[in-house]
Amino acid sequence: MQSIPNSYFSAAQSAARANAWQVFHKIGLTQEDREDVEQDILLELLEREGRYDESRGKPGTFAGVVSHHRAAELTQAIVHDRQHMIYGTRDEAANEPESDWLDILADAEDVVPLWDGVRNYYDDIHTARDLEYAMAMMDDTQRGLFDLLAAHQDMPAACKASGLSTATFYRCVEDLQLHLRMFGIKAAA
């Protein structure tokens, strides 16, 4: 077996650690899960060491790109697994504190996860604050369109209810989406 150069191994360790921390903060992992993600990324980097070509760049660049892609794959897999876990109704969540903002964050079926410490409410609260600030900065036309879209939850129905021509309506929707993106909110497709 061929030995791995120290420069590549150091770059792989650094890239794995950095990307694991990003995943940790992005989706709210436990410390143990973060370590698992870091090990998984490091293993991927060590397996791909043979594909590294020194003439095309430094080891840190190669390790950074590979680890970033692997971290994205792991994030997607973890989020997918969380979405497919068993859910219970709010009545079954006896230890769940009653709070207005928790009701706002619950999905349409009013369910909460049965596992503890997985949901990152910090991000949810900041998103709600960003949306509140974006709403405060909207003009009357944008606010009216936002309310219309929220009421109808269907673009064609909202377009019909708006009384605008289709082209004008979709231009206004695009303007609203750009406004929301200014505040870090990406509108659903």
Image (cartoon, rainbow, N blue to C red):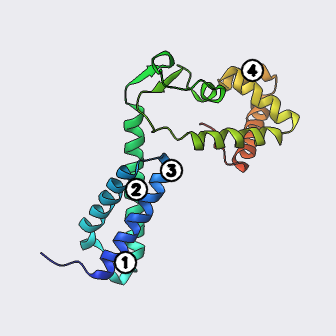
User: Relative to 75, is 156 above or below?
Assistant: above
Q: CA distance from mark 3 to mark 4?
A: 39 Å
Mark 3 is surrounded, within 10 Å at the Cα level, by few (under 14), some (14 to 19) or many (20 or more) other residues, namely few
Residue 83 visible to an observer of this rendering? yes
CA gap, disc 1 to disc 4? Answer: 56 Å
Q: Amino acid at mark 1?
A: Pro
| Foreground: disc 3 or disc 4 | 3
Is mark 2 in CB contact (under 8 Å) with mark 1? no
Q: Quadrant of residue 15?
A: bottom left
Q: Is residue 53 visible?
A: no
User: For the N terminus, which image quadrant?
Assistant: bottom left
**In the structure shown, which secondary structural element does the residue marked by tag 2 occupy?**
helix
Task: Answer with mark 3 or mark 1, whichever residue precedes in sequence.
Answer: 3
Q: Are marks 4 and 2 in contact (CB under 8 Å)?
A: no
- Residue 59 badge: 1
Which label lies toward us, 3 or 1?
Answer: 3
| Residue, disc 2 | 71
N-term mark: 2 or 3 = 3
Q: Nearer the viewer, residue 122 or 70?
A: 122
